[in-house]
Structure formats: structure tokens, C-alpha cells
Image (tube, rainbow, N blue to C red):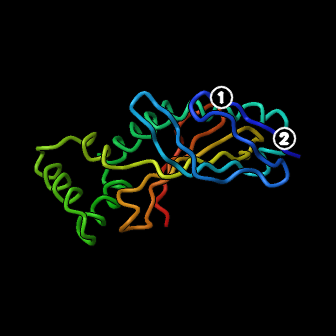
């Protein structure tokens, strides 16, 4: 069955409740248009309550990106996922801008926020969480043309950023 989701930031989205939704969309944010791959799993599209929440969650995308960036900045200071991800891209790939800002960060001439600002949202996915609520994640990339590596920030049904993973 075809249904339409209404989002202020994307416009109407038509999806098949049997298969969900997966397509490139542009999310209009206060900072400009953000092209992302939007995925809505069939578990969401087949659940009337969750399906009714999807437009609001899509419209929360700018807020979620802000929360994700905050968590990424915090993680960068610990030397774990984000630091290793950026170091890999700086040292192993031909990404001059990443290398420059990473070196400035190492020498305390650039902030963690400046380094995290190089990460661009690539995908926004909505799924059914373990507790049955509407959860999501955002995939971030440094350079989709050069690397398939992603930093993925997951959100619980209360829209709290809960964890970061490095995936490809």
C-alpha cells in the first residue's frame, strides 16, 4: 500500500508500506540543502504508530546532526573512534584539506569542532529499535569520492545520540 509521509524539510515522500523507502533526498536545513540517502526500514513503514512519527523525525534532522557533531567532538578528545577515523583519512588517503586541519588540530591550532565540521552527513536511516520505538542513525563521511569509510552515530527513540561506530 502506498502512503505519503509529510516532512517540512523534505516535502511529501511516497513509500510502499511493504518495502519501506530508500532514495536520495535533499533535506532543507537552516544552513542550506543537505543531500542524503534516506532509508526507512519496512518495520517502520508497517507500523502505523511509527510511520506517523517519521515526518517529525525527518524534520529533526538538523537537531540530530548537531547532537551527533557534539558526540563526535567529545569522542575526538578521547582518542578513540573519531580520532582513529580522522587519522586514517589524514595519513592513508589523498585528502589535503583533512590532512591540513588534522595537522592543525594536532598542533592545537584548530579546534575539535573544526575537524568534526569536515564530516558530511551521507545517509539518514530510520528503523525500529530493540524496545519497539523509532530509532535512527546518521552516516558521516570525510570524502565519499575517495573513501567508503563511515562514522555512524546512532540515536535512540528519545533522539539521544547513543553511540558511534566506524563502518564501511
Q: Position of residue 96 (x, y in %)?
A: 19, 62
Judging depth in this view, the residue of 75 and 125 nearest the camera is 125
Q: Position of residue 150 (x, y in %)?
A: 45, 59
Q: Which residue is rendered at x = 31% and y = 55% of the image?
A: 83
Pinpoint residue 59: horizontal percent, then vertical percent: 59, 30
Above or below for 51 versus 167: above
Q: Residues within 10 Å of mark 2 (few under 14, many from 20)?
A: some
Residue at numbered disc 2: 47
> Which SS class for mark 1?
helix
Residue 159 % position (x, y): 59, 33
Contact, CB < 8 Å: mark 1 with mark 2? no
Q: Quadrant of residue 160?
A: top right
Corner quadrant of residue 73:
top left
Front residue (pair 13, 54): 13
Q: Residue at x 20, y 54 (%)?
A: 102
Which dot marks residue 56? 1
The residue lying furthest to the bottom in this view is 92
Tally the numbered discs. 2
> Which is more N-terminal, label 2 or label 1?
2
Query: What numbered label is drawn on residue 112?
Result: none
Q: Is residue 98 left or right of residue 103?
A: right
Amino acid at each position: 500500500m502506498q502512503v505519503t509521509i509529510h516532512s517540512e524539510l523534505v516535502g511529501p515522500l511516497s513509500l510502499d508500506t511493504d518495502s519501506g523507502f530508500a532514495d536520495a533526498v535533499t533535506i532543507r536545513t537552516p544552513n542550506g540543502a543537505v543531500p542524503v540517502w534516506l532509508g526507512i526500514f519496512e518495520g517502520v513503514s508497517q507500523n502505523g504508530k511509527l510511520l506517523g512519527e517519521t515526518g517529525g523525525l525527518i524534520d529533526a534532522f538538523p537537531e540530530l546532526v548537531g547532537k551527533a557533531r557534539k558526540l563526535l567532538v567529545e569522542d575526538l578528545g578521547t582518542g578513540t573512534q573519531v580520532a582513529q577515523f580522522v587519522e586514517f583519512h589524514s595519513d592513508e588517503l589523498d585528502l589535503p584539506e583533512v590532512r591540513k586541519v588534522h595537522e592543525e588540530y594536532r598542533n592545537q591550532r584548530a579546534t575539535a569542532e573544526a575537524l568534526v565540521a569536515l564530516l558530511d552527513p551521507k545517509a539518514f536511516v530510520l528503523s525500529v529499535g530493540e524496545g519497539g520505538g523509532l530509532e535512527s542513525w546518521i552516516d558521516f563521511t570525510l570524502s565519499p569520492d575517495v573513501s567508503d569509510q563511515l562514522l555512524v552515530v546512532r540515536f535512540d527513540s528519545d533522539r539521544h545520540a547513543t553511540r558511534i561506530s566506524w563502518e564501511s
